[in-house]
C-alpha cells in the first residue's frame, strides 16, 4: 500500500510564512490603534498581509489530504474536512504527468481525472511517495496515460 501525504518541510515552511505574516499584521494593527499618527504603510501591511495569511492558512488546512493507493483502489482522505473518497482504478478516465523544466530543477505534477469529474493532483516537490505512485499507475492503468501536448 502506498501512502501519499504532504512533506513535512512543505507544511513547516508554509506555517512559518503564515506565522510571520500574522505577527507582522497583528503588530501593525496594534500600532495603528495605539499611535496618534499612523503612516500609510501600516494600513497597507494590515490590509495585505492579514487576509493573505488567513486565506493561505485556510487553503492549506482544508487542502491537506492523505492518499492511500493499493489493491486497485485510490482512497483520498481530507482529515480536516471529515471527507473520504474511494475510487477504483477502473474509475480513472485518464492521468498525466506534467513535467516543467525550471531554473532550480524539474517540477513534476501528477494529475488523475476520475469518471465523475473529480481530480487528484500530486507533485514531486510537495508530496511523499510520488515516484511509487507514478510507477503503480503505469503498471495498473498505463493505457489511460495521456501525453502532454
Image: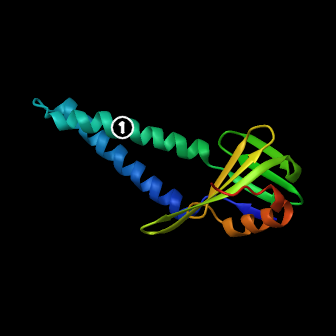
**Which quadrant would the N terminus be assigned to in this image?**
bottom right
**Residue at x 47% of width, y 43% of height:** 56
Q: Quadrant of residue 63?
A: top right
Horizontal side of 35 relative to 73 (left or right) equals: left
How are the colours assigned in the image? Answer: rainbow
Q: Residue at 76% x, 68% y: name it.
A: 135
Q: Nearer the viewer, residue 103 or 74?
A: 103
Q: Is residue 65 left or right of residue 29?
A: right
Which secondary structure, mark 1? helix
Q: Which residue is mark 1?
A: 50
In the rendered image, which quarter is residue 61 located in?
A: top right
CA neighbours of label 1 inside 10 A, class few (<14), some (14 to 19), many (20+): some
**Residue found at the far left of this picture:** 37
Say above or below: 37 vs 52.
above
Q: Residue 26: horizontal and vertical position, in percent?
A: 31, 40
Name the residue nearer the viewer: 145 or 20: 145
Vertical placement of residue 12 versus 77, above or below: below
Amino acid at each position: 500500500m502506498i501512502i501519499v501525504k504532504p512533506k513535512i518541510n512543505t507544511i513547516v515552511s508554509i506555517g512559518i510564512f503564515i506565522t510571520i505574516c500574522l505577527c507582522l499584521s497583528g503588530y501593525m494593527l496594534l500600532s495603528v490603534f495605539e499611535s496618534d499618527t499612523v503612516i500609510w504603510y501600516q494600513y497597507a501591511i494590515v490590509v495585505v498581509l492579514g487576509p493573505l495569511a488567513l486565506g493561505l492558512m485556510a487553503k492549506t488546512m482544508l487542502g491537506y489530504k492523505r492518499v492511500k493507493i493499493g489493491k486497485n483502489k485510490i482512497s483520498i482522505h481530507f482529515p480536516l474536512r471529515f471527507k473520504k473518497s474511494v475510487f477504483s482504478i477502473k474509475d480513472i478516465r485518464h492521468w498525466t504527468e506534467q513535467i516543467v523544466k525550471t531554473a532550480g530543477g524539474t517540477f513534476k505534477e501528477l494529475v488523475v481525472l476520475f469518471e465523475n469529474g473529480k481530480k487528484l493532483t500530486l507533485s514531486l516537490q510537495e508530496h511523499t511517495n510520488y515516484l511509487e505512485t507514478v510507477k503503480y499507475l503505469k503498471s495498473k492503468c498505463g493505457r489511460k496515460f495521456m501525453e502532454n501536448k
